[in-house]
Image (cartoon, rainbow, N blue to C red):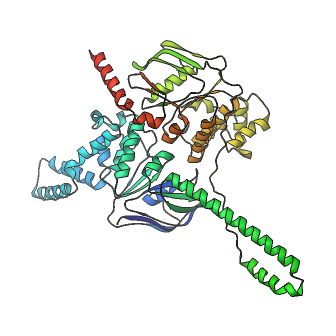
Amino acid sequence: MTMISANNVTLRIGKKALFEDVNIKFTEGNCYGLIGANGAGKSTFLKILSGQLDTTNGEISITPGQRLSVLEQDHFKYDSHTVMDVVIMGNERLYQIMKEKDAIYAKEDFSDEDGIRASELEAEFAEMDGWEAESNASMLLNGLGIDTELHYAAMNTLTGNEKVKVLLAKALFGSPDILLLDEPTNHLDMDAIAWLEDFLIDFENTVIVVSHDRYFFNKVCTHIADIDYGKIQLYAGNYDFWYESSQLLIKQMKEANRKKEEKIKELQEFISRFSANASKSKQATSRKRALEKIELDEIKPSSRKYPYVDFRPEREIGNEVLTVEGISKTIDGVKILDNISFIAGHDDKIAFVGGNEIAKTTLFQILMGELEPDEGSYKWGVTTSQAYFPKDSTKEFDNDYTIVDWLTGYSPVKDVTYVRGFLGRMLFAGEDGVKKVRVLSGGEKVRCLLSKMMISGANCLILDEPTNHLDMEAITALNNGLIKFPGVELFACHDHQFVQTTANRIMEILPNGQLIDKITTYDEYLASDEMARKRTVYTNQNDEDDN
């Protein structure tokens, strides 16, 4: 049986122990979701398992002869190679055989020794199913949404999202014995995520995965490995089972401690009352012994911190919210939006889904007045006020303001204490407020933007991929904040659970720029015939254009 294990592993960075005496085994046939707060060391632990990082103490053991595969993060590393070569590189030995064979057969002076060597390589190549390598690689690429005409293209001609998919195909190629995946769903569209879910569900070897996608974890994970305070606790079951069981365990420990505290108080009162009473002295002594044996369970507070996301509109929204009529937009010769029309009602929480990322962002920018449409118009109701979370916030933070000064600039109340209250909700405490916004991490910038939206008091929220860069705790907090928000929402998000629990209306802009609009939940939309029909609409439209 394939197994990878950490044995008494400790990793110190300076004086801080990121992991201490960690013992855990990952076995064949299971998918392990690695969870923990930002900074807990999830990605670091994957690097330890893969041998990219050395431990301070302890060791990593892998069953001899097993092949380990890792999802790489450097999107430019293979720019000089073709897509097909990169995927096959996922099985390093197979790729080496192919290259050595090609070099031998390319020789003009082919010797007897070359013939013997080529024969040996051909035998090993056949044993490794080498003749199926390219077709297997193509199946992975197609599943992830890489068109066939790109399979032999140079990597440097691909977009960033396409490179991500190729690197994922490389990690999956050749059925590795142990598969380590760090955020594999990042930058994937819903079709690619669904394909990956099915692939991992059917995968028979060992998978260890880091992700912030709760729905993905619930679909694929058989176990959850929880990193907290430098230790890793293993739970059987998916993410929801871990959450419920861990909360239940804490609740049970608190209840047990409460009962113990009541017993301690009762014994102390008896001892205090009767210790000087000769007739009761034996009973008092007996209770002292009983008191000494009672130990309260140590309940460490989790290192996880949940921000408090609460959007409170200053005024109630009226019946007229947003009317969009015939909006079209062409960018770089491509029609991104084609005659888009819809009316948003005062109870609408609209999720924009699908793979047409540029179209969604372009529509949001038009609705916020940042871009002009080529045709058509839109009108916000007089009772509405808007707050916007842009996909690219680079300009927002290209300055030397501190966090407090930056947020004060957007606050209707210029009082520092008032502003710090909003920052505190988003986990910026004390000295954090004097950090320069220019140097903030991706997650910190997202929390700043959410603070800005909260402080605005807007009753219409537009959010373009707000869960990017957030940890699971912050995603959960934002999810809950949007569920209870009494205003209107238009948002794009790849987090399945986020969309399913928040949206009551689904819109998808097709690759041809046209719109599908359904009042339904996300799961119902995915299960409907609409998913098949939308492709028919697009195909028919293309046929008409060709004619």
Q: In which quarter of the image is the N terminus?
A: bottom left
Q: From this view, report whether residue 368 is shown above or below residue 9.
A: above
Q: Is residue 112 visible?
A: yes
Asked whether 285 or 139 is in front, the reply is 285
The image quadrant of residue 117 is: bottom left
Residue 273 lies, with reference to residue 26, above or below; the image says below
Q: Can residue 445 be seen here?
A: no
Measuring from the top left, give residue 43's x and y in whole percent: 50, 53
Left or right of residue 254: residue 63:
left
At 72% from the left and 27% from the top, the residue drawn is 314
Residue sitting farthest toward the front: 279
**Residue 399: x, y in percent?**
65, 32
Q: Is residue 179 above or below residue 446?
A: below
Of 26 and 514, which appears nearest the observer?
A: 514
Question: Residue lying farthest left?
Answer: 112
Decide which of 442, 248 is in the foreground and name it.
Answer: 248
**Residue at (21, 51) in percent of width and height:** 130
Position of residue 171 relative to residue 266, above or below, is above
Q: Answer with left or right where residue 538 lies relative to residue 501.
A: left
305 vs 340, left or right, is right
Rendering coords of residue 78 (x, y %): 36, 43
For the C terminus, which image quadrant? top left
Q: Splitting the image into 4 quarters, where does residue 339 fall? A: top left
At 38% from the left and 32% from the top, the residue drawn is: 531
- Residue 504 image position (x, y, % from top left): 53, 32
